[in-house]
Amino acid sequence: MEQLNPIPLFIAKDYFTCCSKTFEQSLEYLSTGNLVSTKIRKAFCAFREARQVYPVTEDNFLSGERVPIIEAEETNEILLFQLLGGMYKLSFQLQREILELVLFQFYLYLGQDKQFLRNWISSERDTPPRKALKSVLKSSSLYELANESLRLDSTLDNLYGTLSDYTHTKGFVHSHQWLKTSNRPVFSELALHEFSEVYWYVVKYCVSLIAIHFPNAIIGLPTYEKFGYGSPICLIDFDEAEQVRAVFTPEELSVLEYVASKNKEFQQLKSTVEAMPDLTKEEIDNTWNEIEKHMKSTGNSEGQK
């Protein structure tokens, strides 16, 4: 039997050791209140909460339409893991993937091309290029209403260009070596700063698309008072919406709130939820009891998703 070359194994072990040390240093750094750590934490939480409001229906659940937004959420989590471990260039590349996935999600949502979706789900069709994804946004009157003030088109082009520079290694300043100043993973405050600047705007753009079409992302609803612990999974409350609002300026929020006022579907949803009677404390407690019963019947332990 041919003996395996031990060098790749040595490199893997070395990377693991370096990543583990960098991970601890990064966690310590992000636990501080400095501007870089605050921006990363706020952006991460904003995307996580905003993603929840993309509606779940029997049709889009079974058709696979929600695959891109689900994939984007997981990519956002993987991105954070790579960042903390010192894989800085990879974390920039994953930002581009998040951007493309969210764009593609709205391509599917606005286009409603069921045949394309079926072919894409079965891997018979390619994911469309950015130009095609971007063009479908123009069919949304809500997007166009926000685009005029928020300049979303130019923001997308600038972000994509920046992230492509890292993906295609546009010179030394977009290389592994420059970001971590080493040929092994090491903690780099410079890289975290560079990451936070781009990540903040990537999340803001993606969350803008979500909030334009599903304003519950920035306008919380009284879910606890109306549903207790059994709130529909695509609705978020005031505290969760505040985490999304944190990435926007007051002026940007004014634009998004104006667009929300023109969103008839959301206004109807908001009115319906707010008109529901508040649950009593006993009724709220019962919603938790029902969840516990369900978890036990399905074999899920407490704390599992």
Image (cartoon, rainbow, N blue to C red):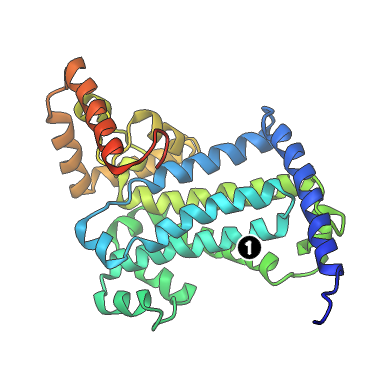
Residue farthest to the front?
1
| Picture residue at 71% right of the left edge, 59% below the top | 89
Task: Give left or right: position of 9 versus 204.
Answer: right
Residue 27 on image: x %, y %: 69, 36
Q: Which residue is at the front of the view, 11 or 106?
A: 11
Residue topped by disc 1: 93
Label 1 Cα crowd, 10 Å radius (few <14 / some 14-19 / many 20+)? some
Task: Give left or right: position of 91 versus 96.
Answer: right
Residue 98 on image: x %, y %: 51, 59
Figure quadrant of the N terminus = bottom right
Task: Give left or right: position of 286 versus 155.
Answer: left
| Picture residue at 80% right of the left edge, 56% below the top | 13
Task: Give left or right: position of 266 versus 149.
Answer: left
Residue 154 visible to the viewer: no
| Picture residue at 34% right of the left edge, 60% below the top | 66
Residue 19 on image: x %, y %: 76, 49
